Amino acid sequence: MLPKRTPQIVTLLATLLTASPAYSDHHAAIDALQEYMEFASYSDGAISPEQLEQQGYEDFYIVDTRNSGQFKNGHLPNAINIEWRDILEQRASLPKKRPILLYCETGLLSSKAHLALSVAGFDNVKVLWGGYIIWSARQTFNDAKRLKDALTPDR
């Protein structure tokens, strides 16, 4: 159930947002986003688990953009945890030359972090397509296949 003050909060936010310079036609942030969107390809920044394996997983700086609780419940090997909302604040700790892999549960939040880093000048960032869910399912499938292959006699 929503708090009783929700209409006042929504009105306040709407007032602040419409008065914000971010809605100006000539704001630097909007210009930077527009420039990025004009030149980004449809698959710019996405990488599948198979491509990640082919390109060399160990070469990537892995960043889990989920919250710390999700990270503690399981994460990709060698990953560090920077929640997606904190990615710009923590950008100084990210490598500029080594490829960076961002992932979250599905790819949605890490895509937001990817966009923010791209606009901030990072051109070495990829997002794991399908996120942790697809990566985990693929690992489970591969484990099952290896077990089946090990248990199946050669013909």
Image: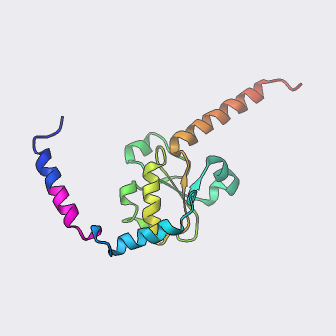
> In this picture, is 3 found above or below 123?
above
Give whichever of 112, 56 is nearer the camera: 112
Residue at image position (46%, 53%) is 110
Residue 92 in sight in this render: no
Residue at image position (63%, 54%) is 57
**Residue 38, magenta (yes or no):** no
Give whichever of 76, 10 is nearer the camera: 10
Where residue 116 sits in the image (x, y, percent)? Answer: 42, 64
Q: Quadrant of the C terminus?
A: top right
Where residue 43 sits in the image (x, y, percent)? Answer: 58, 57
Residue 3 lies in quadrant: top left
Lateral position of residue 153 relative to residue 134, left or right: right
Residue at image position (37%, 70%) is 30
State which region is magenta: 12-22
Residue 112 lies in quadrant: bottom left
Residue 55 in sight in this render: yes
Q: Quadrant of the N terminus?
A: top left
Residue at image position (70%, 53%) is 54
> In this picture, is 130 found above or below 18?
above
Where residue 152 sits in the image (x, y, percent)? Answer: 79, 24
Where residue 87 sits in the image (x, y, percent)? Answer: 40, 61
